[in-house]
Amino acid sequence: PTYRVAVGVRRTPLFRPHLDMASVRYPNVLITGTPGTGKSATAMAVVAQLPQMTHVEIGALVRDKQLHEGWDDDLQCHILDEDRICDELEEQMENGGVLVDFHGADLFPERWFDLVVVLRTDNSVLYPRLENRGYTEKKLSENMEAEIMQVILDETRGAYREEIVVELRSNDLEGLESNVARIIAWVNDWRKNQAAQAVEPSV
């Protein structure tokens, strides 16, 4: 008998390059909000689960490095030297993986951050938190008014692209844990997207 052999086009498997996730940088994240909204607690909880990231608390940095121009008796805080603060952080921010914790948003260059989280706290929760810090009546009133008028939220929306700004409630431990989980999930998704873009073939 005669056998006929079918001749077809040989298919070459599509080569999909793989990028080691360890080589993908971590994003820079800003956690901001009125004093007492849980910025430092949230930041510390995130870096506890993502030790590849570095927590920078601006208040502590200013005190440790003397990045200020003296003390404001009226406002009961340091007068920040904004240029020196930014110069101090520039190289670290370029490397990525920095989680900045500060009660303001427009101090920093917009290009620094991949995600900006604004923490909000109910007045009934925020007032006793600030009272327990020993704030003067004037300082306490100013911060309460700032939260009521969503000053930090509006400042942040004016300083950064809308798509990277996220508002989260921060009233209790359950809220803190939920916020930490959301930030970590976002960081992991961001890195996966960066890896996927890095191996995409150019057209």
Image: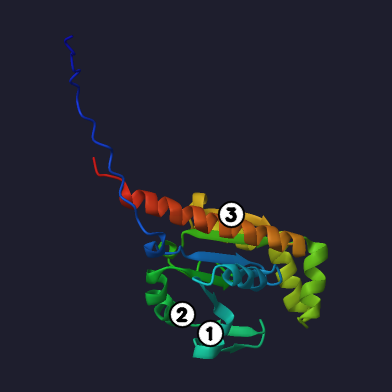
Q: Residue at (40%, 54%) from the top-left corner?
A: 194
Identify the secondary structure beneath mark 1. helix
Q: Amino acid at mark 3?
A: Val
Please, what is the three-letter code of the amino acid marked with disc 1?
Val
Tell me the distance, in whole angstroms, between the alpha carbons under discs 2 and 3: 24 Å
Which sits in the foreground, 57 or 67? 57
Residue 65 spot, x, y in % from top left:
49, 89
Q: Which residue is mark 2?
A: 85
Callout 2 secondary element? helix
Question: Pointers 2 and 1 in contact (CB under 8 A)?
Answer: yes
For mark 3, what is the residue? 166
Q: Is residue 173 visible?
A: yes
Mark 1 residue crowding within 10 angstroms, few (<14) / some (14–19) / many (20+): some
Towards the viewer: 160 or 149: 160
Whether tag 3 and tag 1 are in contact, CB under 8 A, the answer is no
* Label whose residue precedes the other's in the sequence (3 or 1): 1
Q: Quadrant of residue 156?
A: bottom right
Q: Which mark is residue 62?
A: 1
- Seen at 24% across and 44% down, the residue is 202
Q: Position of residue 98 (x, y in %)?
A: 48, 70
Residue type (three-letter) at the residue carrying disc 2: Ile
Q: Earlier in the sequence, mark 2 or mark 1?
A: 1
Q: What is the spatial separation of the Cα atoms under label 2 and label 1, in whole angstroms? A: 7 Å
Kindly identify the residue that appears in the image at 53 percent across and 84 percent down: 62
Q: Is residue 177 rendered to the left or right of residue 60?
A: right
In this view of the protein, which residue sits in the foreground, 139 or 26?
26
Q: Which secondary structure lies at badge 3?
A: strand
> How far is the residue under mark 3 from the one under mark 1?
26 Å
